[in-house]
Amino acid sequence: MVSGGEWIYGRNPVEEALAAGRRTCTEVILPPFDTLDDQLRRIHDECVARRIMIAHKDRHELDKLTHFGHHQNVALKTTGYPYVGFEDIVRAAHDDENALVLVLDHLEDPQNVGAILRTACAVGVTGVVIPEDRACGITPAAVRASAGGTEYLKVAHVVNLPRAIDDLKDAGLWFTGLDWGDDSKPYTEVDFKGPVGLVVGAEGSGISRLVREKCDFIAHLPMPGGFESLNAATAASVTLYEVLRQRR
């Protein structure tokens, strides 16, 4: 067993963790062999090829193991999430004229974090920065919500977000924070070409004051419907695709 490890669950997250190859995996739990469908059979065969221990258990045991997460009849025992050093993201941003770094300002909901990182992986962000305290890390629930997209991302923990933004600005990035205010403008009016950073604030409280002060621009998503409540993951995803649209 992996000391201090964790159980990743869900078909796509397990397949992507195996495909990415960034974690050490030691055990997989599957239903009885004669009940496996094509996707679970692929997972089984990959684990056999890698000499990963296979255990066959029923759904109720997986429910307990994953704390009733949406496991889809599979769980994989791995080492913890492979965070990168913050300096790795700074270096990558400095070397990429179209760098796109995502900063999550104390988001606490693993579903939001996972959904944002799923989109971040899809659009090809350079790296993701999250604070060490009062924030959701890359937990198994976040991995599940990302459909395994987390396994391909560079994610760094930092102690001080404002200082991290300063370091990334020194590397050439211009930062936009998603927030409301007299100084904000529609997200489609921000120039996202070139090296940029995007800050997404916490559920409810939004971007913290010190982080907001570090942003070069503040942008909002217009809501002519009058319902002024948009999920953080939705707002982040819409804006990330606006970045992609402008660059294409």
Image (cartoon, grey):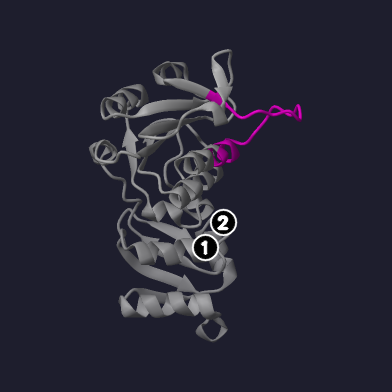
x, y percent for residue 129: 37, 36
Q: Nearer the viewer, residue 181 or 140?
A: 181
Give amino acid for label 1. Gly
Label 2 secondary element? loop
Quadrant where the N terminus sits is: bottom left
Asked if marks 2 and 1 touch (Cβ < 8 Å), the reply is: yes
Q: CA distance from mark 2 to mark 1?
A: 8 Å
Residue depth check, mark 2 versus mark 1: number of the one nearer the observer: 1
Q: Nearer the viewer, residue 190 or 138?
A: 190
Q: Residue placed at 51% from the left, 36% from the top?
A: 108
Magenta run includes residue 59: no
Would you place residue 233 above or below residue 143 in this image?
above
The disc, 2 or 1, on the residue closer to the chain's N-terminal end is 1
Residue 23 numbered tag: none
Residue 69 numbered tag: 2
Q: Residue placed at 39% from the left, 32% from the top?
A: 196
Identify residue for label 1.
10
Label 1 secondary element? loop
The furthest residue to the top: 182
x, y percent for residue 32: 53, 81
User: Which range of residues does the magenta coloring cover?
Assistant: 219-238
Give amino acid for label 2. Gly
